[in-house]
Image (tube, grey):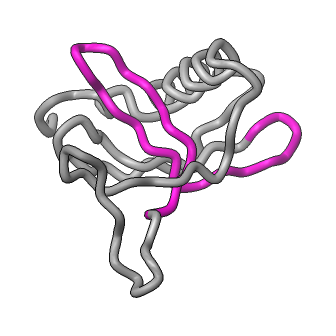
Amino acid sequence: MSPNLICEDFKLVRNHSLRGFARIRFRSGLVIAEITIHVTNGRPWASPPARQILDRNGTPLRDEHGKTRWQPLITFATKAHRNDWSDQVVKAVLETHPNALATEEVA
């Protein structure tokens, strides 16, 4: 098991690149819930929690492709830090849920 991270919970959700939601406990005692786990072009990655960006009427804002815009709740100093964090989270998820990244449910 990873000494820095432990996956306390994983909720399987398959929707496009999304594979599910993880709750991760860090060695420091920090627990982050609603971390999304994705697979794009065969590469797994994790994204910290985010919230929809809403207009003043409460309607979700959309980008030029019609996708909902999201505001990250946690950011990283550099892309390298984010990628390292993502790799560690994915590893922790797979240690407790080895089929989490499967494209179809495994019986």
Q: In the picture, which quadrant includes the N terminus?
A: top right
Q: Position of residue 45 (x, y in %)?
A: 43, 25
- What residue occupies the far bottom of the structure in this picture? 57
Residue at point 35% right, 46% down? 20
Residue at point 30% right, 50% down? 63
Observer-nearest residue: 85 or 91? 85
Q: Position of residue 104 (x, y in %)?
A: 11, 34
Question: Is-magenta flag for residue 51?
Answer: yes
- What residue occupies the far right of the structure in this picture? 28
Quarter of the figure with residue 89? top right
Q: Position of residue 92 (x, y in %)?
A: 56, 28
Question: Is-magenta flag for residue 47?
Answer: yes
Q: Position of residue 47 (x, y in %)?
A: 50, 38
In this picture, residue 102 sits left or right of residue 78: left
| Numbered label tally | 0
Identify the main secondary structure in magenta: strand
Residue at point 35% right, 64% down? 61
In this picture, residue 76 sits left or right of residue 52: right
Residue at point 71% right, 43% down? 25
Q: In the picture, which quadrant includes the C terminus?
A: top left
Range of the magenta residues?
A: 26-52
Position above or below: 40 against 97: above
Position above or below: 19 against 4: below
In this picture, residue 101 sits left or right of residue 94: left
